[in-house]
Image (cartoon, rainbow, N blue to C red):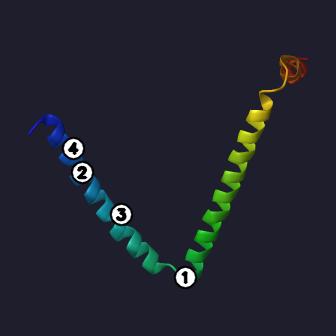
Amino acid sequence: MSRNTVLQLIAAVITIAILAVLHKTLGWLLDMTSTDFMVGVMVGAAAVFLVWYWAEREERINSRSGGSRSTAEQQSPRHSIDL
C-alpha cells in the first residue's frame, strides 16, 4: 500500500473514533436534559438560523443594487467621514 492510502486509513479510523465518542457523550448529555430544554434549544437555533438567513439575503440584495450606483455616490460618505 502506498503512503497516502495508509494515511487515509488512519485518518478514517481516527474520525470514526471521534464520532463514536461524540455520539456517546451527546447521548449521555441529552438523556440528562429535559424535553422543555431541548425544545427551547431547537426553537432558539431555528430563530438564529432565520435571522442569519435574512441578514445574508439582505446583504446579497444590497450588494447587487450597490453596483449600479455611480462612483460619486459611493465616495460621498467617505468624504464626509474624512471631514
Q: Quadrant of the C terminus?
A: top right
Marks 3 and 1, the one that precedes in the sequence: 3
Marks 3 and 4, the one that precedes in the sequence: 4
Mark in front: 3 vs 4: 4
Task: Identify the amino acid type marked 3.
Answer: Leu
Task: Identify the amino acid type marked 4.
Answer: Gln
Which residue is under mark 4? Answer: 8
- Residue 52 position, x and y percent, is 67, 52
Residue 22 lies in quadrant: bottom left
Mark in front: 4 vs 1: 4
Left of 29 or right of it: where is 1? left
Q: Tell me what residue is drawn at x 59 percent, y 81 percent.
A: 36
- Residue 62 position, x and y percent, is 77, 38
Task: Identify the amino acid type marked 2.
Answer: Ala
Secondary structure beneath dot 1 equals helix
Question: Which disc is residue 22 wearing?
Answer: 3
In three-dimensional space, the C-alpha distance between marks 4 and 2, rounded to whole angstroms, equals 6 Å
Q: Tell me what residue is drawn at x 88 percent, y 17 percent.
A: 72
Secondary structure beneath dot 2 equals helix
Q: Tell me what residue is drawn at x 19 percent, y 41 percent.
A: 7
Marks 1 and 2, the one that precedes in the sequence: 2
